[in-house]
């Protein structure tokens, strides 16, 4: 019976988002299941702390 206890659970899949200011500069990151509220969050492929305080590279965004 123990085999059934692990079969039904699913691991949450997190997506990564970057908060951009009005100039397109990255101000924060957030990893969560759904897009955060607000229009300035963009989805990125991964979190890279080197992007904080600068503009995101084009390859970072997920369209």
Image (cartoon, rainbow, N blue to C red):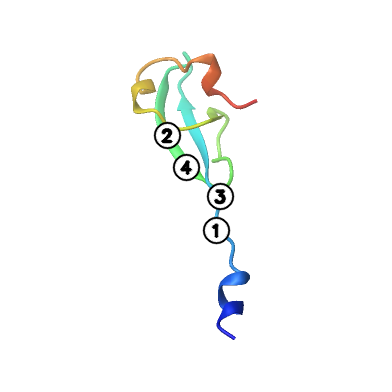
Pointer 1 local density, CA inside 10 Å: few below 14, some 14–19, many at least 20: few
Distance (Cα) linking label 2 and label 1: 21 Å
The residue at which mark 2 appears reads as 29
- Residue 15 quadrant: top right
Judging from the image, what secondary structure is the residue with disc 4 in? strand
Residue receiving disc 3: 13
Residue with the most extreme bottom position: 1
Q: Are marks 2 and 4 in contact (CB under 8 Å)?
A: yes
Mark 2 nearby-residue class (10 Å; few <14, some 14–19, many ≥20): many
Image marks 3 and 1: residues in contact by CB distance under 8 Å: yes
First along the sequence among labels 2 and 1: 1
Q: Position of residue 62 (x, y in %)?
A: 60, 27
Q: Position of residue 38 (x, y in %)?
A: 55, 35
Precedes in sequence: disc 3 or disc 4 = 3
Looking at the image, is mark 2 or mark 3 nearer the viewer? 3
Name the element at disc 1: loop
Mark 2 vs mark 1: in front: 1
Using a 10 Å C-alpha cutoff, classify the residue at mark 4 as few (fewer than 14 neighbours), some (14 to 19) or many (20 or more).
Answer: some
**Mark 1–mark 4 distance (CA, rounded to whole Å):** 14 Å
- On residue 11, the disc is 1
Residue sitting at x 56%, y 49%: 13
C-alpha distance separating marks 2 and 4:
7 Å
62 to the left or right of 20: right
What residue sits 48% from the left and 17% below the top? 22
**x and y, in percent, of residue 14 in the image:** 52, 46
Neighbor class of circle 3 (other Cα within 10 Å; few <14, some 14-19, many 20+) is few
Q: Is residue 34 left or right of residue 53?
A: right
* Label pair 2/1, CB-CB below 8 angstroms: no
The answer to whether 11 is drawn above or below residue 52 in the figure is below
- The residue that disc 4 covers is 31
């Amino acid at each position: 019976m123990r085999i059934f206890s692990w079969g039904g659970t699913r691991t949450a899949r997190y997506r990564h988002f970057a908060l951009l200011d009005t100039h397109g500069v990255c101000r924060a990151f957030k990893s969560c299941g759904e897009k955060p509220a607000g229009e300035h969050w963009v989805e990125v492929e991964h979190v890279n702390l080197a992007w904080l305080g600068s503009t995101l590279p084009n390859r970072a965004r997920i369209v």
